[in-house]
Every structure is written in structure tokens, then in C-alpha cells.
Amino acid sequence: MEKLKKWLSLITNLIFFIQVLLLFLLIFEDRIELPAWLQVAGRLHPMVLHLPIGFLIFLIILLFIQNTFRKKQFRKILKITLMLAAVSASVAALFGFFLSRQGDYGQEVLYQHKLSGVLLSFVTFFLLAWYNTVRKRVVVFYGSMAITLILLVAAGHTGSVLTHGENFILAPVTQSQKEISVETSSLYEIAISPILDKKCFSCHNERKAKGKLIMTSMEKFKLGGENGVEWIAGNPDSSRLIQYIHLPVTDDNHMPPEGKPQLTQEEIFALESWIRSGADFERRLTEYSAEDTLRKWTEIKMKNLNTETVEKSYPFSGVSQQVIDNLNTPFRTVTPLYVNSPALQVDFFIRGAYKATMLEELKTIAEQLVSLNLSKMPVTDDQLKIVAQFKNLEKLNLNSTDITGATLVDLMSLNSLQSLSLSGTRVSNQQIKSLLALPDLRQLFVWNTGVQESAVEEWSKAYPNVKVTYSLYKDSSVQRLTKPFLVSEGIIERGGALVLKHPMPGVSTYYTLDGTPPDTVQGLVYKNPVPINETVKVTAIACKDGWFCSGLFEYTSFVEGIAPVRAELLTPADKKYPGLGSTSLTDGKKGFIDVLNESSWLGYRDSNFEAGFSFGDNPPTLNKIVLSYGDNVGGYLFPPTEVEVWGGESASKLKRIKTISGNQPTAYRSQSVDAITISIDSSRYAYYKVVAKPVKALPSWHSGKGKKGWFFVDEVFFY
């Protein structure tokens, strides 16, 4: 009992000390600079703040059921609960003050939240002190409890405004959707503002303006934030708004921040297109060219919005969040069709990461799966048998997959299918015809396939409920071909070959292996697989009479090298991007440029990349070393400024045998996985050391000028 009294006395004194400290901090807040360790404490505020809420709610419940306890027991429990509520409220207020010094928040709401939080800690301490000393005049106690409850609600409300934006709780029932009209509304209002509303407004509004950037007001958005305007009209790659989106998620400047809903590829495309077209806020949709890509995209979105029906109810139950979390990977997302819906949609990303087993794994949600996007994945005919097991599927996207149409009949079991996309595949008239009889089918996309226009005209008469999209344009002669693609992505085995394909029959593919753009005169005509024995930069275009040639396909194709006996990292990678250590350099697994935090990548910024490779007692003759690296200029990933190769009998007996400078970019460019090739005189050293130096300061044309650049490496090859 004595020990308990001592502890209660100690904690009471601690609370009193925090109250005094809070008063001091509030009075002299403008003169206070927080050290780093207190900034860390401030970031614990979102976690700590739930404790006083829980204790105070428990305290209220306790008062209602006090008659179920003996008086002595009740007083002891009440006293301990008051103490826990007071100490947690005081700590939460203190940590909240620390956090308030680190971000850009609306001053009015921040002041209200800070004041209500501090007053809450004062009142809970008063309750504890009163109960310890007076314990009479019940009206005082219950009056103070009422004030405590009011302050708790006030602090919670202002906190939600700071975190989620104004009117967060009541928004679903109080907000009315603004009427959008093609004639009177600008393209910005129709297409861009809704994206920013969902992903940006909660942190960049009148009350909470991170980086002093307010996006909820057009006029203030145009002025920019503390770093100036967020875009350069006509140049999305040089625009800060786009660059921050493409930074690694763990980067402090990445937007939206880690943990917030991220922008989809479609949304990024819309923002980039809007900036490319001039970032005009007032220009109406009808003032854009009818052939403008952004206008076409917006019209499709508006059509979908206008035909959108009430949220559909489904007869099946949902699956647990744990099941969804287990299926989500960097290359496959599983999300509800809409909030609280049991129906699920699945999207696949990055062709090179796809495996048939990833489709098999979806059998655990076969009943709930209603939308499946396999666009550009190497899905083959035999895998449609798996798709056919998703009986409730309503939307299926197989655009630019490897299917030939031979097994399309397997999809006849999908009686709920409403939309089917087969564009960019090798399907034919007869293979598709049977699917038109599906009872719920309403949309069929077959442009850029072997389907003939005459067949589409017949289908339109026989199946008037099905809208068949055969061409993006009325005149197919102005249509651009899709790019050819590599079947042999990833690392090719020694003695292997490059296999180029295009989904449309009758297309000629022209290519080069030295990175120079091909054309129909100078490019090599692809006919058969091309044998290669070392890393090459493949560029290719597809052409056909009556069509525009495709855009340029570019890909660095890596060939399996001579494996060292042992690899070691002589300098550790950055803690954010450690990969699998030295294993990542020789495991034959390539990294993906849009997923930088996966195990293939090693990231370096504050130190040079240095790795050693041992070839044992009988080393092979080598004449070339290739580093595979990530190139994402907008995300601060640059080629190394310099690469050194050292060789010798052992790690302690080395001499420098080659130094080359990395070709640095002079402007923004598309992100890619690229290669640095270091040719050396034929040698048989037992040990090689490779050193690559990151950019020490980004160039003046870059938005991050003066900051350190990153060097990302995933494999080192020896030939």
C-alpha cells in the first residue's frame, strides 16, 4: 500500500511538472527550436493521443456503474483511472506541442487544437488533485467531468480537421456534388480538381497548408507554395508537382506522403497531360482539340460518371482484410469495388513480374472478384481456364496480353460479364463471336486486333445491346500502332536470343541493338529471334501500310554473365534501400524502376557504391563489366559520375585498371533500368573491386539542385 502511495505521489508530481512546462512552452513558443530527439517525440503524438480518450471514456462508464462496486474498491479504481487519464492527457498535449513546431498547419485550427488539448490536460489534472484532497461537493466533480467531455470533443474535432481536412466526419452527408457542365465548366474543374480533391486537398487547404501550398483555391494554387509555383506549363517532367509524385515513397518529399492514398497511373497521366497542355484553369473542355488525348480521356470519364448507377448490392459476403492484405503485392493490388462493398477488383502491374501463380492465388477470392485487369501481362490461352473460375466477374481487361483467342470459349461460363477488352491481341472474328451471346455483355473492345470491320457491322445488327469498339478513330488510316514488345524480358541465359512481338498481324518490326532509333530504311527487319551474348540496348518500332508507325520501344536487355565465386559489399547500402546485401548483385533478379523498395535494389547516396567479387583460384578471362542501374531523374536517381574497376590477386592487393565517367543527363527524361558498360583489357584477376560514385550535387536545371543524387544498382555482370 505504501509503495502504491509513493507511485501515485511520484506520478502526480510528474503531471504537475508537465503542466508547468506546457505553460512555459506556450508563452515562449516563438523562441523555441526543437532538437531532433524531441521532434521524434512529437511524431509519437498520433499514437499517444488515443490513451487519454480511452481512459476518459472508461471513467465515464465507471461513474455509471459505480453502484456495482464496494465504495472502497470504487474509490481506488477511480483514483487510478483519473491518474492514468491525467498523465496520458498531459503527455499527449506535450507531444502535440512538439509536433506543432514541425509542420505547416492552418494557424487558427492549430491554435484551437493546441488550446483545447492543453486545457484538457489541465482539467484532468484538476480532477485528480481535487479527488486526492477534497473529495466533496460532488457537483464540482461532475461539472468538471462535463467540461472534460466538451474539451475532449473539441480537441478531437480540431485534430481531425488538421489531419483530414475540414468537415471530415460529416462530409459524406453534408457535401453536395457540384454540377459539372461541358459548356460552362473548365477541363480543370471536370478532370483535374477531383483528383486533387481525393489525394491532395486534405494536406493543402486553407486550414492546413503543408509547404504553404493551398490547392483548394484556384487563385492560391496558382501562386504556389514556399518553393514557388508547382508546375512549368508545357513541361510536366520539370514540374515539381510531377517530380514529387515519382520520388520513392519513403522519400520525405514524396507526395502524397507514405501512408496516404497514392495516385494511380491514370491520375498521374491526367495531371501530366494537363500540365503538358499548358496547365490552364479556365479553358473549357470544348476548347481543346477533338483529337487531344486529355480531352478524349476526360470525355470517357464523364460518360462513365453520367452512366454510373447506384452502388450495387451483391448476394455474397466479403472476405477479411487479412485475406486482402495477403494478396496485395507491389505487382498486384486487391481493393473493394467501393467503400464497404464485398465485391473486389484486382489490377496487375509490371509485365516482367507476372507469374501464372499470381492468377491462381486469386482463387481464394473467386466469389468476390468482379473486376480483373490483366492489361499488358503475358497471360496465355491456357490461363483463361483460371479466369473462367471467377463466376461473378463483370469486367475483364485482357488488352495487349499474349492470348491468341484459341481458348476464349472458356469464358462462356462468365454469365455476369458486362465488359470485355481484347484490344492489342491476336483474336479473330470466329473466336469472339460466341462470346457475344453472353447475357449481360454490354461492351466489347477489339481495336488493333485481327477482327475485321465487316464482322463488327454484322455483330452490331445481331447483338444491338453490345457496343463493339473497333477503332479509336473513324478512319483507321490515321491510327497509330502500339509499340512492339520483348517476350524475353529480364536476364537472358547465355546462348539465348531476343524475341520481339507485336499483337497485330501483318506488322513489320524494325530494330537496332546499339540504342540508336531505327526507321524503315536503316533499321534491321525483325524476322527471327536475335542471338545475343552480352548486354544490349534494344530499340524498335512497328509499322504497317495505312497506319502510323508506333512509338519507340526502348529496353536494355541483360545477358547472363560469368558468376563470381563470392560477392561482398565493401560499403553498406542506405538503410532505406538495403536490398539483400551483396546477394542482390548476383542473384539474377532484376529490379523494377517503379518499385524501388523491393529486394533487388541497393541504394547509395551518402557514400560510394563499393563491392568486391572473387573468382577463386582459377579465374576466367574477362574483358567487360556491366552495372545495371536505375535511371529516374525526376526521382533523384542518376547515373554515377564515375566508375572505377580494380583488379588483383586478393582484396588487399589491387590496382586500378579502368576509370570511366558516367554520362550525366542534361534534362528530364523517361525512367528506365539502364546499363553502364566498362570495357577492360583481357585479364584473369582473382579479385575485382567495382566503385561507383553517386552525384554529389544535382545540376542547376533540376528542381532539387544542390541536393545529393541517388545511385541504385541491382546486378553486376562479368563477360
Image: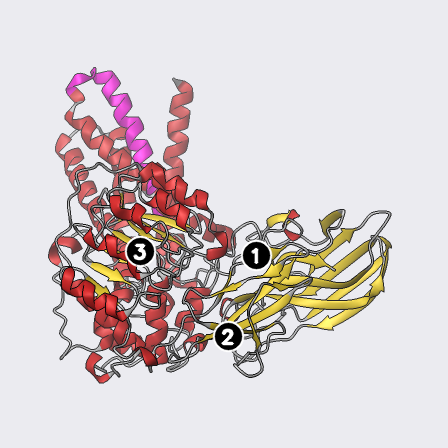
Instruction: Give the residue number, with chain letter if any, for mark 1.
Output: 490
Number of residues whose C-alpha sits closer than 10 Å to that of mark 3, classed few (under 14), some (14–19) or many (20 or more): some
Residue depth check, mark 1 versus mark 2: number of the one nearer the observer? 1
- The structure's colour scheme is secondary structure
Q: Decide whether the magenta segment is chiefly helix, strand or loop.
A: helix
Residue depth check, mark 1 versus mark 3: number of the one nearer the observer? 3
Say if mark 1 contacts mark 3, CB within 8 Å: no
Going from the N terminus, do you reach mark 1 or mark 3 first? Answer: 3
In three-dimensional space, the C-alpha distance between marks 1 and 2, rounded to whole angstroms, equals 22 Å
Residue 307 in view of the camera: no
Q: Residue at x 15, y 50 (%)?
A: 311
Numbered circle sitting on residue 669: 2
Numbered circle sitting on residue 271: none
Residue 139 position, x and y percent, is 12, 33
Instruction: Give the residue number, with chain letter if any, for mark 3.
Output: 431
The three-letter code of the residue at mark 3 reads: Gln
Q: Which residues are magenta?
A: 67-94
Q: Residue at x 14, y 38 (%)?
A: 143
Residue 189 position, x and y percent, is 21, 73
The three-letter code of the residue at mark 2 reads: Arg
Residue 318 position, x and y percent, is 25, 38
Of helix, strand and loop, which one carries label 2? loop
Q: Residue at x 43, y 47 (%)?
A: 329
Say if mark 2 contacts mark 3, CB within 8 Å: no
Number of residues whose C-alpha sits closer than 10 Å to that of mark 1, classed few (under 14), some (14–19) or many (20 or more): some
Number of residues whose C-alpha sits closer than 10 Å to that of mark 2, classed few (under 14), some (14–19) or many (20 or more): few
